[in-house]
Image (tube, grey):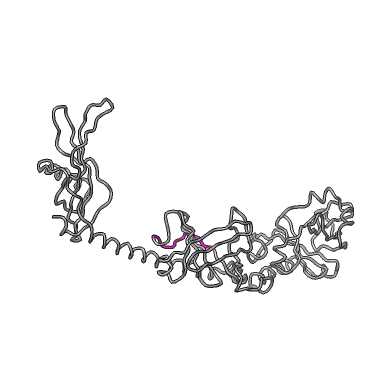
Amino acid sequence: MKNYLQILAVLGFTFLSQIYSQDQVVHLLEPSRDGKKQQFLQIGENNGVKILAMASCKQCFPAAYTYNPEASKTSGKSVYGTAGIYVIPYDNNSYVSVAPKTPAVALGDGIWETFLYANFFSSDKSKVDAMTKNKTEAWAINLSKQIMNGDIGAEPVNASANVYYPAAKKLHNGESFNSVTIDINKGEEIHLNFPNGYGERYSYMVDFSKALGVDVYSVGGNRREYMIVESPLSLIWAKYSSGNDLGTSEWGAYETFNYFHKDQKVIRNLLISKEFQDQIDTKLAGWSVKAKEYTEKMYAAKEAKDIKNRRLPKKGLSNSELENQAIIAAKSWANQYNWEETITKVYFTDNDWSIYRNSLGVQLGRRITGVIVMKRKDGKCSYQQAVFAQQYNGSGYQKVFTEGIVRGINILECTHVN
């Protein structure tokens, strides 16, 4: 909230009396910084900005509080404030002034518990005499509680509108919004629209929606962000942490969510209810398990189909002596890296060797690609592609050795390896 103290310092309190609509003397429960327990209070506008100003004398430097439209809308009262301080009408001629400490949140975002500052002032001195600091703080706490419980200040629910209230208000580039519009084109896409003109587009995920039993939409890319339509009134925004994602990981401690609802009371209840928050967390955990099971099932079905249809690569160069050397080289590699499979044969897939040389052009050896065929413990067979090589000593080639293995195990039926 913009602080208008500098503006007021230039204008002076005497001049303000000419532009403000109200001018009254109020009595303070706690003295002002200059030790006074009586202040001049004025409320009005300056350059279109509503301001509540207070000073110990007509010529004194005033303390200024600007009108807070969000807090006023939230509480149903004309609230002013600056630098974390709220000035809230207590009745028609009295005010409560507080600076929340715990939790240090805006009015309507939590139930206040403790305060850095609390005061009460009124034009009726008898009200001030009957008030205490504890009563002042208790009144502010009760007001924050009534707001969070939905007893006062909540906007009426319009089920047919597309206005939703977010639990976490910081939604775009550090900007916070009390409400957003969400356009749901069922089975196609969701548009999340921010009041600053920006927005997000989420695309419908057919398979996951069927698996989870709720409509799921994804923002796409590598952002791992999803919108889940819980009901016609509510949506859950879910984000997976780095390395995790819907369908491959279960919902964990580092995943985050936001909640959007058309009923502002529901959002306020969520903010103060760990039980409510845990319920949403549990739903997301359950959905993540279903998504992971679905993905694993689909992968297993695809893998089974691939295994059934997979065949060995076509054989290239045929040389029984070199192939025997290659199988010895492959078994040596397998022993070195503790392969569990049993190697049954090795053959070359290239039609000829390729020569490799050093930077001066001197031949160092030759290499060729091939296939290592194996029998697995589960009764199936598999193959891996490999690179075999021979060193050249100037007059001839040495024995074949395994230069490297291409990543990826290719499983197939053993009837197709002979």
Q: Which residue is drawn at 69% across and 63% down?
A: 70
Hey, which quadrant is residue 251 in on the image?
A: bottom left
Across and down, in percent, residue 99 comes to: 71, 59
Quadrant where the N terminus is found in the figure:
bottom right
Q: Quadrant of residue 410?
A: bottom left
Q: Please name the predominant secondary structure of the magenta segment in the image.
A: loop
Residue at the far top: name it. Answer: 360
Q: Residue 388, image x and y in percent?
A: 20, 41
The answer to whether 41 appears left or right of 399 in the picture is right
Q: How many marks?
A: 0
The residue at the point 54 percent across, 58 percent down is 200
Residue 255, magenta (yes or no): yes
* Above/below status of 133 relative to 48: below
Q: Which residue lies furthest to the left in this view?
A: 321
Residue 256 drawn at (x, y percent): 50, 60
Residue 396 located left or right of residue 17: left
**Which quarter of the rendering shows the C terminus?**
bottom left
Most foreground residue, 10 or 247? 247
Chain part drawn in magenta: 248-257
Q: Is residue 149 above or below residue 168?
A: below
Instruction: Please state if 204 lies on the left or on the right of 171 as rendered.
Output: left
Q: Is residue 118 visible?
A: no
Spot occupied by residue 124 in the image (x, y as percentages of width and height): 86, 68
Residue 173 showing in the rendered view: yes
Residue 213 in the magenta stretch? The answer is: no
